[in-house]
């Protein structure tokens, strides 16, 4: 119920997230969860001259990533924080898919925060924080 309180994440995505991870509480940080799902960029480092950041690793559950993508499409329309992130990245000139992966990571961070704190998601919190 806490995960479905996030605007953009429905029951199917929440079920897939809990099913793929067992429980979000097994992770200490949201970054670990993103890495487990396969949403972090790969990197190739060799010495001091070669530092390549590649595409997302895609090592996790493919079905879960597909559901998160669809949730991100909904979130950029109705979730205030995700919409602001997406708009900011697109204005900087980032490609559509990179912005969508960033929104997917944002949703994962929101889900992790909601489950670890035990407080349901508040979409208006973003607006209150921006006014301060």
Image (tube, rainbow, N blue to C red):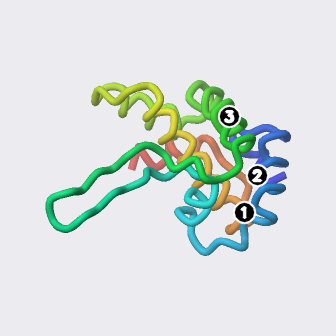
Q: Residue at x 61, y 34 (%)?
A: 72
Q: Is residue 126 above or below residue 115?
A: above
Identify the element where label 3 is drawn. helix
> Which residue is the site of mark 2?
17
Mark number displayed over residue 18:
none
Q: Residue at x 66, y 42 (%)?
A: 65
Give yes or no for contact between labels 3 and 1 (Cβ–Cβ under 8 Å): no
> Which residue is the site of mark 1?
115
Residue 80 falls in image quadrant: top right
First of labels 2, 1 by sequence position: 2
Give yes or no for contact between labels 3 and 2 (Cβ–Cβ under 8 Å): no
Q: Residue at x 31, y 26 (%)?
A: 91
Residue 27 position in % (x across, y down): 65, 71
First of labels 3, 2 by sequence position: 2
Residue 9 falls in image quadrant: top right
Real-space Cα separation, disc 3 to disc 1, in angstroms: 18 Å
38, 106: nearer the viewer: 38
Q: Is residue 129 left or right of residue 124?
A: left
> Which residue is the site of mark 3?
71
């Amino acid at each position: 119920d806490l995960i479905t309180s996030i605007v953009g994440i429905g029951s199917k995505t929440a079920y897939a997230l809990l099913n793929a991870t067992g429980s979000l509480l097994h992770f200490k940080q949201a970054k670990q969860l993103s890495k487990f799902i396969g949403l972090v960029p790969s990197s190739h480092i060799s010495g001091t001259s070669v530092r390549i950041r590649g595409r997302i690793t895609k090592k996790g559950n493919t079905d879960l990533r597909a559901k998160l993508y669809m949730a991100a499409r909904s979130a950029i329309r109705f979730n205030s924080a995700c919409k602001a992130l997406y708009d900011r990245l697109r204005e900087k000139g980032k490609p559509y898919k990179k912005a969508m992966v960033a929104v997917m990571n944002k949703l994962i961070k929101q889900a992790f925060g909601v489950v670890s704190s035990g407080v349901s998601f508040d979409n208006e919190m973003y607006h209150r924080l921006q006014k301060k």
